[in-house]
Image (spheres, grey):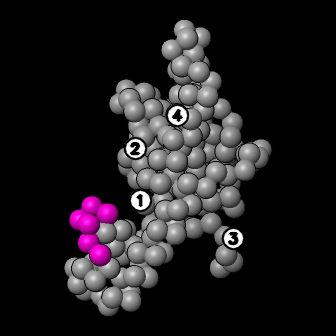
Amino acid sequence: MPNDAPPRWDRRMQQRLARGEAAALGELYDRFASLVHHLAHRVLEDEEAADRVTREVFGYIWENPDAYDPKKGSMRSWAATLAHRQAVQRLRTAQAAAAEEGDVTTEDIEERIREASVGARADYIVTSMPAPLRAALELAYFDRRDYRQAAAALGVTEDEARRRLRLGLQLLSTAYVQPPRAVPPPGYGRAL
């Protein structure tokens, strides 16, 4: 299978959604709703707003299954991208209203959006990384264990624990890199 071929599940899911199979939407929702909601909540810091974004994202997916391009990434990444963009759009709207009232400045709005976006990207990276990497990072971060203690807890060599921590941190560090401003691909940047 070529490297750019989408996973079989993603292709089948898109086909089922395009045929209007309600069960496909239910399956997709069961699989990704917590991710979508978490990312929206991370940006908006509001449970009700995150609930609305979650409904909007899955409504958009249901109405526009052909907007998903398997060559651009996984269905999971697409749902996460839609959630993030919709949440940021809501945050911009709310913050712009606050700016009109003089409560915040445009710079404050952009800084808040940047911070929320970095946090959401970091969360997505951590939840997407393989379990062995995530376990090593959790031991180091939450339990304050060094690589030797993490190796003992994970039942791996110290070299393997260092490798997992290094790779996990490298992946996580990409959350803090500001992507260049570019035109998003079709279906990934359209308003929901």
Helix, strand or loop under label 1 = helix
Residue at (64%, 51%) from the top-left corner? 178
The residue that label 4 is drawn on is 112
CA separation in Å, label 1 and label 3: 22 Å
Report the front residue among 119 and 2.
Answer: 119
Helix, strand or loop under label 4 = helix
Q: Position of residue 8 (x, y in %)?
A: 56, 67
Q: Earlier in the sequence, mark 4 or mark 2?
A: 2
Q: Earlier in the sequence, mark 3 or mark 2?
A: 3
CA separation in Å, label 1 and label 2: 11 Å
Q: Image quarter for residue 101? A: top right
Going by the numbered disc 4, the residue's amino acid type is: Arg
* Disc number lying in front (1 or 4): 4
Disc 2 crowd, CA 10 A, few/some/many (<14, 14-19, 20+): many
Helix, strand or loop under label 3 = loop
Above or below: residue 164 compared with residue 82 = below
Q: Which mark is residue 38?
A: 2
Q: Is residue 166 magenta?
A: no
Q: Is residue 143 magenta?
A: yes
The residue that label 1 is drawn on is 127
Q: Earlier in the sequence, mark 4 or mark 3?
A: 3
Residue at (42%, 40%) from the top-left corner? 42
User: Can I make out residue 86 in this image?
Assistant: no
